[in-house]
Amino acid sequence: MTSEIVEFDAGRMTRGQRRIALTAIGGYYVDGYDLLVLSGALLGIVPDLSPDPGVLGLVGASAFVGMALGSLLTGPLTDRFGRRPVFFASMAVFVLASLGFLFVNDVWQLIALRFCVGFAIGADMPASAALITEFIPSRRRGTFTGLGGVAWMLGALTAIAVTLLVFTASGVEHWRWVMATGAVAAVLLLFLRRRTPESPYWLRAHGRHEEAVAAWRYATSGEAGSPEPAATGGGQPAPLRMLFRRPLAIMMVMLCVYWGCNNLYGSAILLYQPSLIKRIVTPSTFTSLLFTACTTALAVILGLIVCLWVIESIGRRFIAITGTAVAAACTFVIWAGFGTSWLVLAAFAVTIAVINGGTSLAFYSWAPELFPAGVRGRAVGIVNMVGKTGSVVGTLALPSMFEALGAVSFLVISALAVLNAAVTFKLAPETRGLTLRQLEERTHA
């Protein structure tokens, strides 16, 4: 072991680090699959269970309530007991809850199971985000944290394909089987996660230096050229009040506003996209699903461009501000051109693409980077809780708001996006290319 302090996120990418990151990114895939599988299943749920607009809002919002509570309650657990236990348990809960959809007989059972699924996804977010951030070299960290958003969209695309396959083969009345298919990916993910080690940063923050180095050695697979870290330095366990002091308090405010607004309008638009497009443009059920697949595919392409080139060359701040401004402009166009089908379709497509393939990816990179290891799980949990609370409000409000206001709903969304862009421009830092040690030093500056 060398006398020079070498950080765990120094050096080049190894096969072991890539494998660990992909098992964490898989959690985002499951999240995307879950949201879009409900989006399509609603086309069968509504005629089968006949929920009124208020109850329909609860169907959409219940998972987000679970996500908010899951992130808030398990964030502290990832800081106290480690990333790995929560990382594994969250997927086990998801599998059980997904299989429960096969036995749903009324809308309230559906709402309860949606809450449980959401809780599992929310619990997975702090642990997955921390593991990706703490195992990936600083030069590739933005790419791999951003790839979580791309995996989310690939999960969404898979869900749309499965929904179309099942509905075409056997009809929308088989929506329960569609909802239960989420368990398949989660079971595979459980198997792949079984060998994931604990985070070396968490181990070192808790004084377990030998175990931290052993986890690092496992991640680097003994590849030549990988530097040997010293068993000193790194984050220390920190009290929660640290998050409410400058400069971390400013970062908390910025991220809560950014992720809260992004989810407030983004989740609602995405979840109800097939239903909204069906009412706005065409009466065809499958045409609306195919359009949703096209917009999601566009988001995947944009997301790959952002992850592979933009996020590490231009930075997170540019993506966040530019993407939010474009979303504001496009939702304004939807309101202004509501009677013109092609214009509405184009604006919808761009809105979905920049939210899922741009602004969300900036958050996935920012959230774990901006906070020290000792409070990273709690910080990500709190911010994600605020974001999912935004999703709850948006999914509850949009059906009723669209009934009452029609196209004006999108003018309201545009105004929220403008506010979000302004706050981000004022408060957001750039973290591109900085090691975790350098980022932590900022908190003590």
Image (spheres, rainbow, N blue to C red):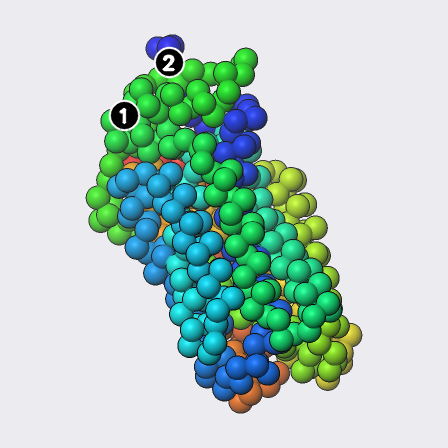
Q: Nearer the viewer, residue 260 or 414?
A: 260
- For mark 1, does the 10 Å Cα neighbourhood hold few (<14), some (14 to 19), or many (20 or more) residues? some
Q: Give the number of the disc on residue 4.
A: 2
Residue situated in front as seen by the camera: 100 or 336:
100
Residue 46: percent from left, percent from top: 57, 80
Place of residue 128 in the rendered image (x, y in percent of width and height, measured from the top left)? 44, 44
Q: Is residue 294 left or right of residue 434?
A: right
Q: Are marks 1 and 2 in contact (CB under 8 Å)?
A: no
Looking at the image, which residue is at 40% across and 25% down? 215
Query: How far across and down, in percent of the image, does residue 162 sit?
Result: 66, 60
Which residue is depicted at the point 30% across and 28% down?
204
Mark 1 or 2: the one toward you: 1
Between 238 and 176, the one lying in front of the other is 176
- Please tell me whether mark 2 sits on a helix, a strand or a loop: loop
Residue at the right extreme, as displayed: 342
Q: Disc 2 residue type?
A: Glu
Q: In terms of depth relative to the viewer, which is nearer, 195 or 55?
A: 195
- Name the N-terminal-most of marks 1 and 2: 2
- Quadrant position of the N terminus in the picture: top left
Say which residue label 1 marks: 208
